[in-house]
Image: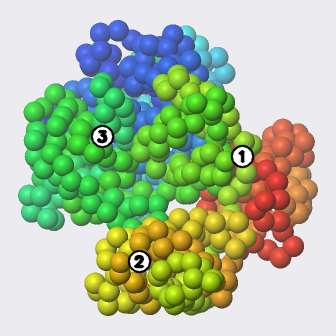
């Protein structure tokens, strides 16, 4: 059985979940057509998802066409759940990018297309809602070429668009398709220029090849609710998107990645694993590699106690997806075997908040619940904070609202969130050392000798701890006490922000038996580490967002002046009459202000999108953490 893993991506309300329901229903995977409005769809099975009518977590469903099993991954559309989408992209063989024929190309659509093109993921564009009043086809195709990608060609035509009588007919690849393909296919270009002109078979073959390598995008029309054009879309999926070839590296050892974690029927954690090579069967012992938040890599091993392969097979084979359970629990991002060919590029959350239980007796259950939710989404980074609160990292206010509802409904906990604030980070500026020798009963009252060196680590490495002392010079419990305390201490740096991308090395150690205890090392480590960090110095960094603003031509000067006053660094300005596209990077704490002021400057005609990018050193004169500056992340 050939397997295709297809993701459905779109701006909010473009019809992702409705299209998933239609595909499942048309191919016999469900016996009735679910509705987002009625809250009875197959993939949005959470209470919050059904009430709000949005997808929050990626879901997997499958249907079969001939000898091909299609696994559908329905992804969130709201920008606050960008990490869910990034994780899904890693496990896909291809994608369907939905547009609404009424709303057209929206901000989130452009962000998604950029990600798909960056990954060179085979992508088909599907224009949905052709039977809705106000639907456009020809004009929308021009918008797609201008705003999404010029390398696109329609393979269907629409009659009576914008009415309930809208119908879709196939449009075989022709001369117009060949002209569009010539921009990305040298053989087609040569045939058009030098002759003989490419035949229909030549064009079809080039179309399949360029779709497969992600450089060209076929476009189909239809209506998920009415069913028009869906059969043509499925035909395109099967004919133009190749199934993944199982990897050969690592022999027969299984390789895969965990891209989602959900609570199981008995409360256990169920992980969704995409397998790239080898096989997994029940009771097999597996070893996963896990990257911790401080940059370390640990191993998680256990036997598979439950294995539910999408499609019903008994064994998980390369290319397929399964829900499985391993004692101890798996987390999103855990890797089975070696690295995969397509690693997700997670933009870190830039919003931080503190969570407290409204009722004091629920403080401990709240922390346990947040840690469980962080296993489903490690980018939440739940950690203890002062006064019994828990610190969380998020992408935006909608994610915060959904989290509060999840705590109330799934765990019975009423939680209060402080207003979101932009998260700053510190990085070591240089190298610093400090040490303390035994005994200092008059100074620190710790029976321990500790010397530490702090220095910058590679960008994106998080935190690392190493040794220059002789192996075995300290008991293992003392070593562990120092290492754990180092990472805990650097959660707060010299300015109050967390320290990242550091390397701390133990350069001196000693103890007195039987007087020394692990508590001595836990107590002394912060004192030595703080002095070493102060000598190294730190640089405060703030998060930035990459933005794209499409504005009317006569407002360009006003808009660029506004963005410049907010601290934007511009990377490009393209276009002309009637609109210009301005791109650049802006401090995340100023994004919300830009979003609020743009409509007034552009008569409401501006189209704005932004996404987290790398942080930068805080410019002189700007405020850092603790200033009460509110933050916003997303679109």
Using the image, tell me which numbered label, if any, was put on residue 420: 1
Could one spot residue 558 in this view of the protein?
yes
Residue 328 percent across, percent down from the top left: 28, 45
Task: Give the residue at x 16% y 65%.
Answer: 249
Q: Pick the residue in front: 262 or 57.
A: 262
Asked whether, in this view, residue 148 is left or right of residue 482, the answer is right
Q: Is 411 rendered above or below residue 297?
A: above
The reply to whether the C-beta atoms of the residues labelled 3 and 1 are less than 8 Å apart is: no
Task: Give the residue at x 56% y 18%.
Answer: 51
Q: CA distance from mark 2 to mark 3?
A: 49 Å
- Callout in the foreground (1, 2): 2
Q: CA distance from mark 3 to mark 1?
A: 31 Å
Q: Is 222 rendered above or below residue 76?
A: above
Question: Could you tell me which secondary element the residue under label 2 belongs to?
Answer: loop
Q: CA distance from mark 1 to mark 2?
A: 46 Å
Using the image, tell me which numbered label, if any, was put on residue 515: 2
- Quadrant of the rendered image containing residue 59: top left
Figure label count: 3
Q: Is 471 rendered above or below residue 301?
A: below
Which residue is the site of mark 3? Answer: 272
Image quarter (top left, top right, bottom left or bottom right) of the N terminus: top left
């Amino acid at each position: 059985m050939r397997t295709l893993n297809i993701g459905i991506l779109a701006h909010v309300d473009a019809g992702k979940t409705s299209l998933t329901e239609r595909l499942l229903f048309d191919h016999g995977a469900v016996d009735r057509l679910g509705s987002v409005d009625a809250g009875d769809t197959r993939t949005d099975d959470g209470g919050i998802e059904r009430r709000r009518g949005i997808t929050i977590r990626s879901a997997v469903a499958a249907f079969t066409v001939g000898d091909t099993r299609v696994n559908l991954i329905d992804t969130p559309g709201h920008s606050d759940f960008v990490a869910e989408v990034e994780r899904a992209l890693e496990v896909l063989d291809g994608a369907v990018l939905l547009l609404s024929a009424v709303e057209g190309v929206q901000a989130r659509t452009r962000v998604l297309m950029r990600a798909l093109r960056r990954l060179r993921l085979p992508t088909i564009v599907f224009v949905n809602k052709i039977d809705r009043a106000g639907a456009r086809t020809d004009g929308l195709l021009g918008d797609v070429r201008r705003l999404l990608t010029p390398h696109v060609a329609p393979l269907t035509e629409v009659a009576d668009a914008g009415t309930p009588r809208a119908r879709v007919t196939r449009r075989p690849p022709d001369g117009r398709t060949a002209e569009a393909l010539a921009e990305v296919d040298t053989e087609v270009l040569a045939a058009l220029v030098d002759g003989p002109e490419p035949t229909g078979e030549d064009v079809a073959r080039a179309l399949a090849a360029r779709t497969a390598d992600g450089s060209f995008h076929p476009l189909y029309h239809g209506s998920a609710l009415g069913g028009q054009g869906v059969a043509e879309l499925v035909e395109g999926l099967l004919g133009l998107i190749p199934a993944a070839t199982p990897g050969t590296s690592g022999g027969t050892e299984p390789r895969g990645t965990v891209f989602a974690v959900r609570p199981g029927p008995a409360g256990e954690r169920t992980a969704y694993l995409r397998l790239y090579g080898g096989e997994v069967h029940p009771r097999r012992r597996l070893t996963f590699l896990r990257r911790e938040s401080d940059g370390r890599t640990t191993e998680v091993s256990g036997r598979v106690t439950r294995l539910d392969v999408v499609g019903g097979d008994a064994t998980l084979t390369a290319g397929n997806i399964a829900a499985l359970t391993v004692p101890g629990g798996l987390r999103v991002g855990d890797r089975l075997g070696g690295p995969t060919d397509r690693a997700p590029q997670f933009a870190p959350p830039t919003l931080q908040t503190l969570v407290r239980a409204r009722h004091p007796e629920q403080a401990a259950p709240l922390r346990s619940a947040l840690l469980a939710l962080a296993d489903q989404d490690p980018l939440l980074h739940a950690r203890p904070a002062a006064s019994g609160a828990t610190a969380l990292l998020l992408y935006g206010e909608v994610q915060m609202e959904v989290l509060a509802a999840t705590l109330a409904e799934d765990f019975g906990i009423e939680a209060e969130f402080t207003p979101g604030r932009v998260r700053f980070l510190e990085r070591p500026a240089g190298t610093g050392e400090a040490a303390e020798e035994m005994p200092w009963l008059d100074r620190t009252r710790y029976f321990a000798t500790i010397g530490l060196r702090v220095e910058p680590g590679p960008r994106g490495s998080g935190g690392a701890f190493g040794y220059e002392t002789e192996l075995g010079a300290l008991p293992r419990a003392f070593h562990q006490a120092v290492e754990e305390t180092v990472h805990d201490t650097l959660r707060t740096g010299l300015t109050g922000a967390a320290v990242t991308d550091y390397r701390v090395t133990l350069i001196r150690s000693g103890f007195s038996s039987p007087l020394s205890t692990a508590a001595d090392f836990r107590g002394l480590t912060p004192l030595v580490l703080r002095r070493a960090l102060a000598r190294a110095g730190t640089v405060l960094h703030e998060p930035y967002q990459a933005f794209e603003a499409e504005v009317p031509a006569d407002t360009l000067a006003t808009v660029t002046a506004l963005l410049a006053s907010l601290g934007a660094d511009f990377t490009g300005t393209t276009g002309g009459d009637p609109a210009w596209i301005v791109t650049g990077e802006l401090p995340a704490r100023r994004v919300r202000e830009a979003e609020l002021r743009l409509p007034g400057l552009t008569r409401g005609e501006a189209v704005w999108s932004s996404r987290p990018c790398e942080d930068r050193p805080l410019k002189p004169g700007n405020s850092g953490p603790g200033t009460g500056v509110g933050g916003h992340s997303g679109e």
